[in-house]
Amino acid sequence: MRIAWIGKKSPFCGNVTYSREITNALLDKGHQVSFLHFAQEESEPENWPNLQEVPLPFIYKSQVYTIPTLKATKVLTESLRKIKPDIVHASLTLSPLDFVLPEICEELRLPLIATFHTPFAGKGAKLISGTQLLAYQLYAPFLVNYDRVIVFSQIQRELLARMGVREENIAVIPNGVDTIKYSPGASQVKAEFQAQRLFVYQGRIAPEKNVEALLRAWKQSPMEANSKLLIVGDGPLKSSLEPFYGWEYGIIWLGFVAGEARRIEILRGADVFILPSMVEGLSLSLLEAMSSGVACLGTDVGADGEVLEKGAGIVINTKTVRSQLRTLLPVLQDHPELTTLLGQKARQRVLDRYTLSKNITLLEELYKQVLTHQPLPLSRRA
């Protein structure tokens, strides 16, 4: 099958990881994949597949959204006409191009699938006000014009359906992890940071990630000197938080870690992974930690609570993150047998539900379904 994949290659975020892992896996299954994206730099060349690439011109790009140039639509259209794919799959980049893609693909008579990553706060329609709610309200009328929309959980499917997207056109395909690559193993990270117990946060240092609640809870908890908290990632709040939560409290700021092998080594050395976010979709960082056999704490936002439910991890309430962490951090520090058990359960949950191979199988089935059924005209997809 010839697949035109439209997504992100930089800067590093969950969307970038999703594009890299899925395109690699599709190539491994024998499909022909062309990758149309907004950057050729700032990525990890050793981890990206060797495939045909088409750079799309842009004015600005960030971890959250992308602004293409006026020429980008023409470049995209001409590239798709030349590639002649069987199907187009857009890992939506929060870009104006997302809204014109259905028109382009209808003109070229190409089936079009979207993966909608935008995070949300909780169950039902409990979106926090601001950019997340706006994104859902903005995108829903346009997602109607895609042949299929992939989301990560049933909760998200119901949410989009209530906003007008036809429920039968919304496919739930959770994120998947390469469980061979992300697996328990030896690590020298604890020795490197002189830690007996190692806690890790990995992600953006941004308001919606609620990292300050974790930092304050750590600072206020009776943590031993040989317990360390690694903060892996970068973002707009890093410069304002780092001076107040440093080495004297056992907190180590690693910044953005580009190498995947290094990130895996950190996870393999960790005892506990903490994700205190206020909004999420389905965190790949969380799934990677679980697959690596790390005990995980996460908030009940997006699909993360669903991933951790029934003993696969500890689910905390977004309204009382700091107070819950103040209670839980010393307990997890003092009871290694508990974190070992939680890590085993986390690994098993991923093996049961969230493997990359299962994700790709479901994706291939969806492609075949779309290709073997005549898509409805845009005028009838309302």
Image (cartoon, grey):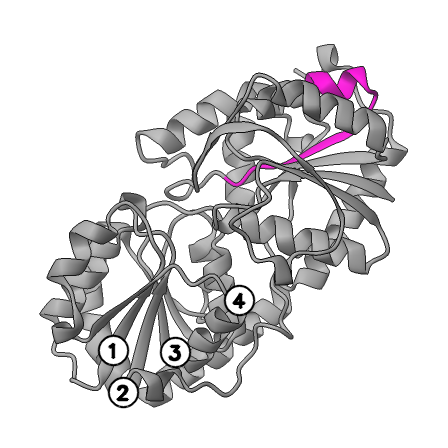
**Type of residue at label 1?**
Lys
Labels 2 and 4: the sequence-earlier one: 2
Labels 2 and 1: the sequence-earlier one: 2
**Type of residue at label 3?**
Ala
Labels 1 and 4: the sequence-earlier one: 1
Labels 1 and 3: the sequence-earlier one: 1
Tell me, for residue 194, which label it has, or none. Answer: 2
Alpha carbon separation for disc pair 3 and 4? 15 Å
Tell me, for residue 228, which label it has, or none. Answer: 1
Residue, x 56% and y 29% (percent of image)?
Answer: 161
Residue density around tag 2, few if under 14, some if 14–19, many if 20 or more, within 10 Å: some
Q: Which residue is mark 3?
A: 270
Q: Is residue 258 left or right of residue 275?
A: right
Instruction: For mark 3, give the secondary structure.
Output: loop
Asked if residue 348 is among those painted magenta in the image, a careful observer would answer no
**Type of residue at label 4?**
Glu
The answer to whether the residue labelled 2 contacts the one labelled 1, judged by CB atoms less than 8 Å apart, is yes
Residue density around tag 3, few if under 14, some if 14–19, many if 20 or more, within 10 Å: many
Labels 3 and 4: the sequence-earlier one: 4
Alpha carbon separation for disc pair 2 and 1? 8 Å
Asked if residue 116 is among those painted magenta in the image, a careful observer would answer yes
